[in-house]
Amino acid sequence: MGRETLHQQYEIEWKELDCFEKPFKRNNFFELIYVMEGTGVQFVNNHQFNYRKGNLFLLTPQDSYSFDIDQKTRFFFLRFNESYIKEKSGKDQDTVTHVAYILQNASHRPGCILKNKADKPFIFSLVNAILDEQTRQQIYYTRISEQIVSTIITVVARNIALKLPKNIKENTGEPILEILNYIQVNIFEPGKLKTKNLSRHFNISTNYLGRYFKTQTGETLQHYITHYKVRLVQTRLLHSDMRMSEIAYELGFTDESHLNRIFKKYNGISPTEFKRAGKR
């Protein structure tokens, strides 16, 4: 299976299809696919998901994917490469964090990326706005289109930031989503993630916070924080040249040995083995 290459920083396309053109695709770039109309099945990395109007999918360079179209489907494609997000990430620290969230999502299961319910109509309006700009091509349309592209990617990053434990559903209450988001935003500041400080921030008793988190997510608070850190370690191993000591310091591990031990506990292999396998 050959990889498709993107020859510019980003590319926009929309198509109405009765069948997907290739059995399976793999890209050298990131691809956002929004379903404007239609139904069918999305296949990603040996998993499948029944799609419908309003679904937004993120495909990374690690993913192989295809669609089995049921009802004629109108797709919106937004493709962007790593150089585009690196250029944007240089402008402020928040965007650097957003990029980390996007890269972290490598080889995810299929399904709509939109976890924040309020973002669904927002993405709908952004997609239609960019299509309107591309169709009419009035003065400054290229610049406006680029700003909309950046907004779409940022909204996607916000939803990846809400990467949820298995027990969390779309109708789960806001309090647990706020806690998860707070943990992920402050993952590089271990002091803020101590139970007593989380309790104080959310005005919840220490004992209740632990029980509430376990009930809502199916895992303990400490397990979730550690597992999230391990996923960030994976991202850095695959997508950066950081040394293990630097990663350990950034994520608040005691030292490199501590990081190696925790990583192997969650992944079954050492960070070195994981990096070697990911570069094949």
Image (cartoon, rainbow, N blue to C red):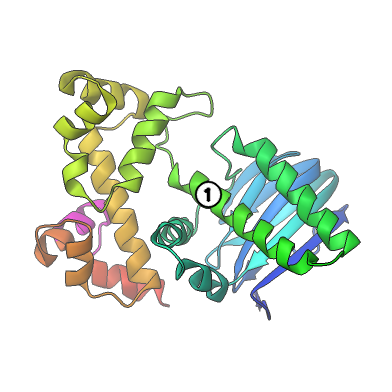
Q: List the single residue furthest toward the front.
A: 139
Task: Tell me the chief SS of the magenta region.
Answer: helix
Front residue of 163/88: it is 88
- Measured from the top left, where is residue 204 in percent x and y? 24, 20
Residue 24 appears in view: no
- Residue at point 52%, 73% (across, down): 87
Q: Is residue 226 above or below residue 120?
A: below
* Circle 1 residue: 109
Screen quadrant of the N terminus: bottom right
- Residue at point 53%, 49% (across, down): 109
Magenta stretch in the rendered image: 261-270
Query: As shown in the figure, which amino acid type bears the numbered disc 1?
Result: Arg
Classed neighbour count for the residue bearing mark 1: other residues with Cα under 10 Å, few (<14), some (14–19), many (≥20): some
Q: Is residue 88 above or below residue 216?
A: below
Mark 1 secondary-structure assignment: loop
In terms of image quadrants, where is residue 222? top left
Front residue of 121/225: it is 121
In the displayed structure image, the side of residue 164 where residue 52 appears, left or right = right
- Measured from the top left, where is residue 83 in percent x and y? 54, 76
- Residue at point 58%, 41% (across, down): 114
Tally the marks.
1
